[in-house]
Image (tube, rainbow, N blue to C red):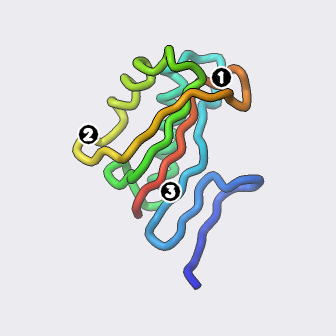
């Protein structure tokens, strides 16, 4: 049986299984900020988790991006394009959905190699 590392309470912030990192949904803490700032903050949290787990942006395999309103798609993409490793882009999907908090504008779920 392989070793599984879990970091979190109700739901793990991330799980490591063998050489794969699964990062749970990351959102901004400052929900008064606009979409660009929320995207930057959430991706900053992803960066910290990647480092803690022994990975980095070059090893991101897939990303699910959720936005509250598709009208924010272009602005979200501008921030994503600044963050993502353009030499090693992951598979990606994006959708709009009702968020857990109405002030939340963006959430990201990542899978990465270690």
C-alpha gap between disc 2 and disc 3: 22 Å
Residue behind mark 2: 86
Residue 20 against residue 52 in the figure, above or below = below
Residue 40 coordinates in the image, percent (x, y) = 47, 29
State which tag comes first along the sequence, 1 or 3. Answer: 1
Q: Residue at horizontal 41%, vertical 42%?
A: 92
Check disc 1 and report its element: helix, strand or loop: loop
Q: Residue at horizontal 45%, vertical 44%?
A: 63
Residue behind mark 3: 52
Circle 3 Cα neighbour tier, 10 Å, few/some/many (<14 / 14–19 / ≥20): few
Residue 21 against residue 71 in the figure, above or below = below
Q: Residue at horizontal 49%, vertical 41%?
A: 64
| Quarter placement of the C terminus | bottom left
Tell whether 35 sits left or right of 10.
Answer: left
C-alpha gap between disc 1 and disc 3: 25 Å
Residue behind mark 1: 31
C-alpha gap between disc 2 and disc 1: 28 Å
Residue 84 coordinates in the image, percent (x, y) = 34, 38
What numbered label is drawn on residue 106?
Answer: none
State which tag comes first along the sequence, 2 or 3. Answer: 3
Circle 1 Cα neighbour tier, 10 Å, few/some/many (<14 / 14–19 / ≥20): some
Residue 56 coordinates in the image, percent (x, y) = 38, 52
Mark 2 or mark 1, which is nearer to you?
2
Q: In this orientation, which residue lies closer to the viewer: 99 or 6?
A: 99
């Amino acid at each position: 049986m392989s070793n599984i590392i879990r970091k979190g309470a109700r739901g793990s912030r991330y799980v490591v299984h063998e050489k794969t990192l699964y990062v749970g949904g990351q959102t901004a803490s400052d929900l008064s900020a606009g979409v660009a700032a929320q995207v930057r903050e959430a991706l900053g949290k992803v960066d910290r988790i990647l480092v803690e787990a022994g990975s980095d942006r070059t090893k991101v395999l897939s990303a699910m991006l959720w936005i509250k309103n598709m009208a924010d798609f272009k602005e979200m993409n501008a921030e994503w394009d600044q963050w993502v490793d353009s030499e090693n882009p992951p598979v990606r999907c994006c959708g709009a959905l009702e968020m857990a908090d109405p002030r939340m504008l963006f959430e990201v779920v990542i899978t990465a190699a270690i």
